[in-house]
Image (cartoon, helix red, strand yellow):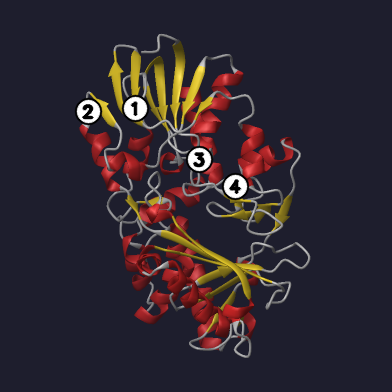
Amino acid sequence: MSTKPYDTLVIGAGAAGLAAARKLHDSGQRILILEARDRIGGRIWTDDKFTDFPIELGAEFIHGENAATIDLVHAAGLTTIPVDRYGKLRWAPVSLPAVPLAELPAELRATITGLFMHYRALPQHDPLPDISLAQYLRGKGWDEEALKIADVLLAQTCCATLEDLSCADLIREMRADHAGKEEFRIREGYGALLKWYSRDLPIQLNTLVRDIHWGEGSVTVITANETLRARRCIITVPVSILARGTIRFIPDLPEDKHDAIHAFRTEPATKLIYRFREPFWDAETTFICHNGLATRWWTPGYGRDGAAVIGCFVTADKARILDEQDENRALTWGLTELNWLLDARDTDLRKASIGARRVSWAFDAYARGGYAHLPPGKASARPILARPEGGVLFFAGEATAHDSNPQTVHGALESGWRAAAEC
C-alpha cells in the first residue's frame, strides 16, 4: 500500500484529465494521473505512421475560432489549418457524383438549406418540451425523406440518430456556445499538442482503477497493483465507462447521479481511412455527404500540397453496420460508395489504394463508442453528472460540459479546468 499523500488523484489522461491536472500541478498541488491505456489522449489519438502527416483516428477538428484549444495551440508554438467544411459541403443525389450545393436540383438544395435554417433557429425558440430533433423537424413540415438528409447532416455529427437527440440539450449548448463557427485542424496533430500540454505531469499509464472509496474528506483509489490515498479525486473517464460499472464507488453514488450517468447514450463511431498515391479529388474538397452507408467524407490532408488521404466518419446505426463487417469488407464497402461520389468509376480505387484502416471506437475498451449524447426527456442529466459529490469527488469530461460544447475537445478541456477550480 502506498502511503504517499496526494492532494488530488485524476482518473483519465484524456483532454479533461490533462486540463484538470495541468491547473492543479501548476498551482502547486501534489497530483497523480491514473490512465488505463498505454498512452495519453483518450478519444484523441494521432497516427504519425499512416502517411507523411498526422492522421487523427479520433477527435480531429478544433470547433471554433474562439475555442480554448486555439490558445493552447498558439502557446505550444503549433499551427492550425483552416477548414471550411459546411461552406464547401458537397452532396450526392442517389447514385450520382457529389456536387456543391449550388449545383444541386433546386428542390434538393432548398431542402438542405431549409433543414440547416430550422436547426440553427432552435435557440431562438421559447422553451420547448424536451422532444427529439426528428419531432421538432416534423413539426416544421419536413417529410421522412428530408429527415434522412437531416440525420446525416445534423444527427451523425452528434453520434446519435435524429430520433434520439434531445432538442432541449441542443438548445442549451447553442445558447452557451462561445467558441465560434470556424473550424481548424492542427497541422502538427492533436498528439503534438497533448505532448506539450502534459509535459512534466506525473502520469501513471496502464493503470486500471477498480474501486474508489470516498467520504470524510479523503479518497482511497484501488488499482490492480496498489492503493492510493488523496484528499480529492477528479473522474474524467467517459460516461459510457461509468455506466458499465467498470469503476466501483464505495459508498454508491447518489441516486440522481446514478440516474444521470445512465441517461446518456453512447453510440458506435467509426472511421474508414484511405491513402492513395495521388488524390482523386480536387484541392477544394473538404466535406462530402450522401444518404448511403458511408455517409460523411472529408480530406484529412486538406491544406497540404499533394496529400492523398480521404476518410469517412460515421456514427450510430450506420457505424454499427460497418462494425458488423470484417475490416476488409467494411473498407471495400466504403470504396464502392466513394467511387461514384468522386465520379471515379473508370478507376479501381481498391487497386489504387496503398493503405487503409478502420477505427471502430465501439470496440475500444476504454471508450465503448464515440461522444455521448442525451435522448429526449433527459436534458437535465448533464449538470447533475458534473456536480461534485461530498467535497471529495469531482467530475469532468466532454459529457459534463453543460456550460460549453459537449462532444468537443475544448468542451473537455473547459470541464477539466472547472473541476480543478472546484477542487
Q: Secondary structure at mark 4?
A: loop
- Residue drawn at (34%, 27%), measured in percent from left and top? 224
Q: CA distance from mark 4 to mark 3?
A: 13 Å
Label 3 close to label 1 by CB (< 8 Å): no
Q: Say which amino acid is labelled 3.
A: Ala
Q: CA distance from mark 3 to mark 1?
A: 27 Å
Q: Which residue is mark 3?
A: 412
Q: Is residue 4 visible?
A: yes
Q: Which residue is mark 4?
A: 179
Q: Say which amino acid is labelled 1.
A: Ala
- The residue nearer to you, when weighing 404 against 287, is 287
Q: CA distance from mark 4 to mark 1?
A: 40 Å
Disc nearer the start of the sequence (2/4) = 4
Q: Secondary structure at mark 1?
A: loop
- Residue drawn at (36%, 65%), measured in percent from left and top? 320
Q: Secondary structure at mark 3?
A: helix
Q: CA distance from mark 3 to mark 2?
A: 25 Å
Kindly report which numbered mark, 2 or 1, lies closer to the viewer in this rendering: 1
In the rendered view, would you say 246 is above or below 320?
above
Q: Secondary structure at mark 2?
A: loop
Residue 270, horizontal then vertical, whole percent:
45, 61
In the rendered view, would you say 422 is above or below 319?
above
Residue 180, horizontal then vertical, whole percent:
61, 51
Say the numbered circle drawn on residue 224: 1
Q: Say which amino acid is labelled 2.
A: Asp
Label 4 close to label 1 by CB (< 8 Å): no
Side (left or right) of 135 relative to 301:
left
- The residue nearer to you, when weighing 134 against 289, is 289
Residue 358, horizontal then vertical, whole percent:
49, 63
Q: Quadrant of the C terminus?
A: top left
Q: Say which amino acid is labelled 4.
A: Ala
